[in-house]
Image (cartoon, rainbow, N blue to C red):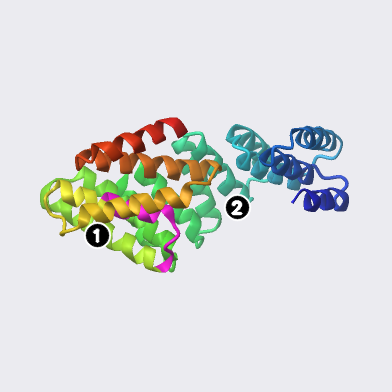
Amino acid sequence: ALEDADTLIERFPESAWPCELKEFIASQLGRDEAARAAHALAQERAKTNPSKQDEHLGALNALDQGDPGRAVALLTSLIDQRPELFFARMDRAHAFERLGRLDDAIRDYNVALGLNPRDGIARLNLGVLETQAGRTEEGSKLLEGVQDAGAMGNQALSFNLLARGRAAEGDAALGFFRRAEKEARQGLERDPELPWLHINLGASLMEQHRLGGAAAGAVEEATQHYTRAVELTENRRDPDGLEMSASALSNLCDQLIQTNDLTRAAHVCTETTRRF
């Protein structure tokens, strides 16, 4: 991988982004000296040959390296010059998400959707953020309007339905949780490797169990899905992977406590604390 980055550095002798890519790869491999050298070269090139492409790719590298603040700064500079750039808006919205600035992220996704009304990813992401912000009905309308979104669509809808169920009571809540279960199962048929689908399915089953409306074996199945989500995210070190891993472990810990499996709960909860 480092050799490939060196090739890009030679191929694009005025651009900073190949150097930032090498810095990221080297840091992941524990090659600190190579990472520092690549960082210095990137800074030198950025000063002498700034470009819009470098700003955008530099922002993406900053996101990969867990620095969303820098990504926002780079993308804001780019958007100030070219406000019509759809992907810059999308990527800045993602960076705002990482920073927990939901209103700013929602604003950028709305602008992106205005620039490209047919983009399903912008609509999905906006629907999920509206749900996170507590505007579940608005989120639902956005998500249900997405066509052919595949397993990602099922993932987003199941998340929204879980939120709507938790805001409801009695039979209405149970209905939302059953619909969330259905969406998650459909998604897993399409892509069984998506951790959030396993987490959402486990959560929908446990919520039904809490309300006394779960099918036989629901708790055991929820445990299996939380465990599978933990396995799928075990080696992820990127911010999105760490978020999924933390959610899977905390849900598993809570589920084990609820079912009085205290020995295993102690192990899982300790692991959760150790990792996060």
Residue 275 locus on image (x, y percent): 46, 34
Residue 13 locus on image (x, y percent): 88, 47
In this rendering, which labeled residue sits more in front, label 1 or label 2?
1
Packing grade of label 1 (10 A; few <14, some 14-19, many >=20) is some
Q: Is residue 88 left or right of residue 242?
A: right
Taking depth in this image into account, of 194 and 97 the one nearest to the observer is: 194
Q: Amino acid at mark 2?
A: Phe
Residue 223 locus on image (x, y percent): 29, 50
Vertically, is 96 above or below 116? above
In this figure, which residue is indicated by the disc labeled 2? Answer: 86
Packing grade of label 2 (10 A; few <14, some 14-19, many >=20) is some
Q: Is residue 196 left or right of residue 99?
A: left
Q: Is residue 90 left or right of residue 135?
A: right
Q: Quadrant of residue 52?
A: top right
Q: Helix, strand or loop at disc 1?
A: helix
For the record, the magenta segment spans 190-203
In this figure, which residue is indicated by the disc labeled 1? Answer: 179
Asked if the magenta segment contains residue 86, the reply would be: no
